[in-house]
């Protein structure tokens, strides 16, 4: 029998969001007889929900202080040396880093620990647009270029993410694999029952936004779209599931302008919320592959989203939804088409569900990683 492959998964923090979900599914789903895995992560900020505390309570992790989001030289150095010690103690065969900060510290620690582990890094998106000023972005690119040269395999979670990174000179094309994220098939919920459980009426159409209310996700644009829909007299209500630093200010503005929006805050019942909805929306300036849109597609919802990042891997324009420019009027145009045509909503929703089943299944994602770790 082949020996177990030791895999160390390193991620800066397991805040509720796509990377945490993917890492949790890898920890759970990879064959225990073939792989021995250890998860190393930092702590979440106060205003973030920790996925390990709220959802994935079955997953054990080794926590390293200072590995989290904020950048501070002393904390980062502590986290770095903590990683070096763990790598020396555990002697993994594969070190798989996720997210930018963990990718830098984890790969450098692996080099210093000198254990000859194979390095793999996943780009769950990238920091090339919308995060930093141009000087900082240049430094980020330089660091990633240097590290890419010392990494065996670079995984991008979408084709656009890979193409952007290659265009920026980060890693050569032959180092990349595109592994789409995979999600378990959701339970089926009856629409009327979930609507009444959520306390919402079945008389109106619901457009749902799921995500952190943070600058890159552009909740202000979502409010602009809601305003545009109100001015056009569309009988729709927006549902917003998620929190973040712009949560309170978004609620205040919505109240002041009397927009048709219900703010649910952070929720763990996203499948039910999508089951009660008619259309899904995302208004971001930049994205990797948003898992919430895969969930929306699994729930047979047509999707209206800005054409950024690798969203185009999930949403096929005019087939499973609409990819629009970032202008609120364009987004409202797409919504209006869907609102006025129930048959179009049904058709696009079904096409999206079929695509999600084909490309974004959990089995497919686990097989991709299983084969990669084994061949390495």
Image (tube, helix red, strand yellow):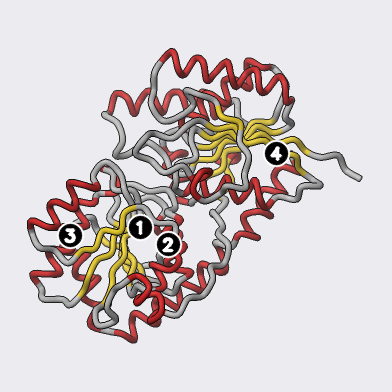
Sooner in the amino-acid sequence: mark 1 or mark 4? 4
| Separation (CA) of disc 1 from disc 4 | 30 Å
**Image location (x, y in percent) of residue 75:** 45, 17
Binning the other alpha carbons within 10 Å of mark 1 as few (below 14), some (14 to 19) or many (20 upward) gives: many
309 vs 209, nearest the viewer: 209
Image point (24%, 63%), residue name: 262
Q: CA distance from mark 1 to mark 3?
A: 18 Å
Q: Assess whether mark 4 and mark 1 are in contact (beta carbons under 8 angstroms).
A: no
Residue pointed to by mark 2: 270
C-alpha separation, residue under disc 4 versus residue under disc 3: 45 Å
Question: Residue 170 placed where, x, y %?
Answer: 48, 33
* Numbered disc in front, either 1 or 3: 1
**Regarding mark 3 in the picture, which secondary structure is present there?**
helix
Q: Which residue is mark 4?
A: 37
Q: Which mark is residue 210?
A: 1
Whole-percent x, y for residue 292 in the image = 42, 58
User: Residue 256 appears in which quarter of the rendering?
Assistant: bottom left
Eye-nearest disc, 1 or 2:
2
Q: Is residue 210 left or right of residue 39?
A: left
The residue sitting at 46% across, 63% down in the picture is: 295
The image's mark for residue 322 is none
Q: Quadrant of residue 200?
A: bottom left
Query: In the rendered image, which residue does mark 3 sit on?
Result: 328
């Amino acid at each position: 029998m082949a020996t177990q492959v030791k895999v160390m998964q390193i991620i800066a923090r397991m805040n509720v969001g796509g990377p945490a979900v993917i890492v949790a599914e890898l920890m759970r789903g990879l064959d225990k007889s073939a792989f021995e895995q250890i998860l190393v992560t930092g702590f979440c900020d106060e205003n973030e929900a920790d996925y390990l505390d709220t959802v994935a309570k079955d997953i054990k992790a080794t926590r390293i202080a200072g590995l989290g989001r904020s950048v501070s030289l002393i904390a980062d150095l502590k986290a770095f040396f903590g990683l070096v010690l763990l790598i020396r103690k555990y002697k993994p065969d594969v070190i798989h880093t996720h997210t930018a900060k963990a990718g830098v510290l984890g790969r450098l620690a692996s080099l210093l620990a000198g254990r000859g582990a194979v390095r793999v890094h996943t780009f769950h998106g990238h920091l090339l647009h919308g995060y930093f000023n141009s000087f900082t972005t240049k430094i980020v690119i330089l660091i990633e270029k240097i590290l890419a040269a010392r990494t065996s395999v670079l995984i991008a979670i979408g084709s656009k993410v890979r193409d952007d990174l290659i265009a920026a000179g980060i890693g050569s094309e032959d180092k990349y694999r595109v592994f789409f994220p995979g999600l378990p098939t959701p339970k089926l919920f009856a629409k009327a029952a979930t609507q009444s459980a959520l306390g919402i009426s079945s008389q109106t159409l619901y457009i749902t936004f799921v995500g952190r209310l943070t600058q890159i996700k552009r909740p202000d644009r979502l409010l602009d779209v809601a305003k545009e829909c109100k001015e056009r007299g569309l009988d729709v209500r927006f549902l917003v599931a998620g929190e973040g630093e712009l949560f309170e200010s978004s609620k205040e503005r919505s109240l002041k302008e009397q927009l048709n929006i219900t703010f649910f805050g952070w929720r763990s019942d996203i499948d039910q919320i999508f089951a009660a909805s008619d259309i899904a929306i995302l208004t971001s300036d930049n994205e990797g592959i948003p898992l919430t849109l895969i969930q929306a597609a699994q729930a047979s919802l047509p999707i209206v989203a800005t054409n950024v990042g690798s969203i185009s891997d999930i949403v096929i324009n005019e087939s499973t939804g609409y990819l629009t420019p970032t202008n609120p009027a364009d987004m409202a145009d797409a919504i209006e088409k869907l609102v006025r045509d129930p048959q179009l909503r049904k058709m696009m929703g079904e096409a999206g569900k079929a695509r999600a089943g084909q490309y974004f299944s959990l089995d497919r994602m686990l097989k991709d990683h299983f084969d990669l770790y084994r061949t390495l």
